[in-house]
Amino acid sequence: MRKVVTMGATILATLTLAACGSTSSSSSNSSSQNTTASSSSQKKLPAEYQSALNKAQTYSDTMHLSKKGLYRQLTSSSGEAFEKKPALYAVNHVKANWNENALAKAKDYQDQQSLSPARIKTQLTSSVGEQFTESQANYAVQHLNK
């Protein structure tokens, strides 16, 4: 490891090395630029947007909502009551596999309500139901018993 003279550079080099697990000065320099860039973009995200994204991730992971269902939950006055822009940002940036969310919901309907595959597909795509796309609902029904 190279000794750095200034305190700020020492802290940055130490953080970079710790984050990257690397002792190469060239990879440390590029890594510190990447780390700084991603930190800057995270800091620029307004708190309401970050909160909406956090809620969206929780709902996607635990309730397996569709993209439209997630947006509806985030913006509903009886739900989270986020403004439209933060909610839209959240549904567009959440880490979700919509096919797998549809499949999880389909399995819930099959296990808890003993619905037929046709009825499950209807529930998954209904505008008053789960609001998955036709493609996502087809994926779910095709993978129900696999």
Image: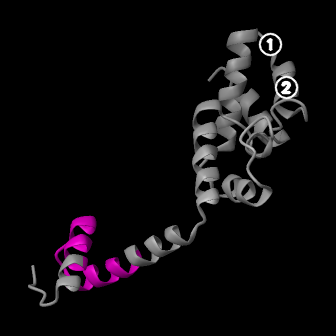
Q: Please give the residue where the numbered disc 2 appears in the rendered image.
A: 123
Which quadrant does the C terminus fall into?
A: top right
Q: Which residue is mark 1?
A: 115
Does residue 65 sit above or below 42 in this rendering?
above
Closer to the camera in the image, 83 or 121: 83
> Up-down: is 135 above or below 88?
above
Q: State the quadrant of the N terminus.
A: bottom left
Query: What span is colored magenta in the figure?
Result: 12-34
Spot occupied by residue 142 in the image (x, y as percentages of width and height): 73, 29
- Compared to 118, does 37 lie above or below? below
Characterize the magenta stretch by its predominant secondary structure: helix
Position of residue 118 in the picture relative to residue 114 (left or right): right
Left or right: where 12 falls relative to 125? left
Tell me residue 52's x, y (percent): 64, 51
Residue type at mark 1? Answer: Leu
Mark 2, secondary structure of its residue: helix
Give how far across and how far down residue 68 sits, in percent: 80, 44
At x 85%, y 40%, the residue is 134
Q: Are marks 1 and 2 in contact (CB under 8 Å)?
A: yes
Q: Is residue 57 highlighted in magenta? A: no
The kind of secondary structure element at disc 1 is loop
Separation of marks 1 and 2 at Cα, in angstroms: 10 Å
Q: Residue at x 72, y 24 (%)?
A: 106
Query: Can you say whether 74 is above or below 35 in the image?
Result: above
Image-based side of 4 in relation to 117, left or right = left
Residue sitting at x 22%, y 66%: 18
Give how far across and how far down residue 38 sits, in percent.
Answer: 46, 72
Chain-order first, disc 1 or disc 2: 1
